[in-house]
Image (spheres, helix red, strand yellow):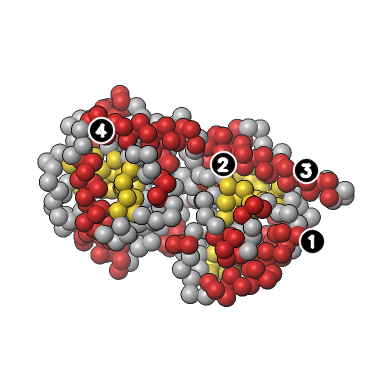
């Protein structure tokens, strides 16, 4: 089948859900297109992490490696992290002659515009929702939720448009009045064949990168902005840990603003051995997980959790609605939000563990991903939802080809 994914921001070097989903759908025999915003108007806080240099060339490389064609659409502006794509988005979608249109993000401006035109566009839709309570910060959110419940929710429910929740949250029911039983839960996941423990690679990568096998390596890979707790992390690592062999690897670019400057200064004043690396492509990240002993996340939750655990890394996570389950059954430890002392205590507890004890955490971490979050299986489930949407739409619209 021919699938079109519509996403405001897409970067071919990233490891987001769509990067992996689209590739696996092609592997399963589907023809896949991604429509995303041109990079020119994308806010700096989004594009600075991966960079926007030579993006057309990177899109071509992504196509050659995956078979997924990326089409860039001009945008008028961005508002609250959402793109307002130009009007030709409608003719662009029609020109591709897709079987199913996947709208990534139920509350983006683009998704809302297309939902309002649902009856005119004559295509089956599938929508997903990534929303969590802790990520909803806009000061106008209450007004927006009222608008959504009045104008958008009735369109979704009346037309039985499938909505996939990619996080186990009741956000869409609580705020948009879309019943949970009208949605499907399909979580994130990862490529378990690529992100996996490998003892020989661990030893060779450590040697190449200047680390010894006796080092206890703590990894953070991700954004270093305020939402992800960049300054919290840098401040937490200032004082020396009582372990001679502990070393920290920090992977990720820092935005060049006042907040980024604070983060940079705090890291530079650390008494610990911190090794900094720029943002890596999705494939390059594997070696960083494979050489490390644990992964840490100072704030919220992260999709890279799946890659870390798939490589057998226990995790240290902020206590919130998603992370409680993620560390259950000895897969990691929680710390109270904003507590540097608890964050440090969790890291210290792992460094003091016997090898047999930490191996329990490592084994549980890997098994959890293999059993529940192997993205090859998850991707098939996404495709099944899209194919079902196509078949249902075809039955209801006899003139649909």
Q: Residue at x 17, y 46 (%)?
A: 273
Marking on residue 357: 4
First in sequence, mark 2 or 3: give its number: 2
Q: Residue at x 34, y 54 (%)?
A: 318
Q: Does residue 73 appear in this view?
A: no
Q: On screen, 48 above or below 140?
A: above
Q: How far separated are the C-alphas under marks 3 and 4?
A: 51 Å
- Of the two numbered discs 2 and 4 on the same chain, state the one appearing first in sequence: 2
Tell me the number on the disc at residue 21. 2
Q: Secondary structure at mark 4?
A: helix
- Where residue 309 appears, as percent x and y from the top left, is 38, 38
The picture quadrant where one finds residue 225 is bottom left
Q: Can I make out residue 386 in this image? A: yes
Per the image, the residue denoted by label 3 is 391
Estimate the spatial distance between the alpha carbons at disc 3 and disc 1, rounded to whole Å: 19 Å
The Cα–Cα distance between marks 1 and 4, rounded to whole angstroms, is: 60 Å
CA separation in Å, label 2 and label 4: 35 Å
Q: Which image quadrant is residue 208 in? A: top left
Q: Is residue 51 left or right of residue 224?
A: right
Q: Residue furthest top?
A: 200
To which residue does mark 1 refer?
Answer: 120
Choose between 385 and 207: the one closer to the eye: 385
């Amino acid at each position: 089948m021919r699938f079109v994914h519509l996403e405001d921001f897409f970067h071919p070097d990233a490891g987001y859900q769509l990067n992996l989903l689209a590739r696996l759908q092609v592997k399963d025999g589907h023809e896949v297109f991604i429509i995303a915003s041109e990079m020119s108007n994308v806010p700096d806080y989004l594009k600075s992490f991966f960079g926007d240099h030579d993006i057309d060339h990177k899109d071509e490389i992504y196509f050659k490696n995956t078979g997924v064609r990326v089409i860039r659409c001009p945008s008028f502006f961005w508002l609250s992290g959402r793109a307002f794509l130009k009007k030709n988005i409608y003719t662009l979608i029609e020109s591709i002659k897709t079987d199913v249109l996947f709208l990534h993000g139920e509350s983006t401006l683009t998704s809302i515009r297309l939902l309002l035109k649902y009856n005119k566009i004559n295509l089956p839709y599938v929508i997903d929702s990534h929303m969590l309570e802790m990520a909803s910060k806009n000061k106008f959110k209450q007004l927006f939720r009222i608008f959504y419940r009045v104008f958008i929710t009735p369109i979704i429910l009346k037309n039985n448009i499938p909505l996939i929740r990619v996080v186990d949250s009741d956000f869409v029911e609580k705020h948009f009045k879309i019943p949970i039983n009208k949605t499907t839960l399909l979580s994130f996941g990862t490529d378990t064949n690529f992100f996996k423990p490998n003892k020989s690679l661990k030893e060779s990568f450590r040697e190449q990168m200047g680390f010894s096998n006796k080092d206890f390596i703590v990894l953070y890979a991700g954004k270093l902005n305020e939402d992800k707790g960049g300054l919290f992390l840098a401040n937490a690592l200032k004082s020396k840990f009582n372990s001679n062999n502990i070393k920290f690897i920090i992977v990720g670019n820092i935005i060049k603003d006042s907040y980024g400057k604070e983060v940079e200064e705090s890291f530079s004043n650390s008494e610990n051995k911190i090794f900094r690396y720029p943002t890596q492509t999705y494939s390059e990240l594997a070696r960083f997980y494979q050489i490390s002993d644990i992964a840490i996340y100072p704030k919220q939750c992260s999709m890279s959790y799946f890659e870390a655990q798939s490589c057998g890394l226990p995790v240290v996570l902020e206590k919130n609605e998603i992370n409680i389950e993620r560390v259950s059954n000895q897969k990691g430890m929680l710390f109270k939000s904003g507590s540097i002392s608890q964050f440090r205590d969790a890291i210290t507890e792992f460094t003091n563990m016997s090898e047999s004890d930490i191996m329990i955490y490592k084994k549980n971490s890997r098994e959890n991903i293999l059993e529940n979050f192997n993205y090859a299986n998850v991707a098939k489930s996404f495709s099944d939802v899209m194919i079902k949407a196509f078949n249902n739409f075809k039955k209801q619209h006899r003139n649909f080809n």
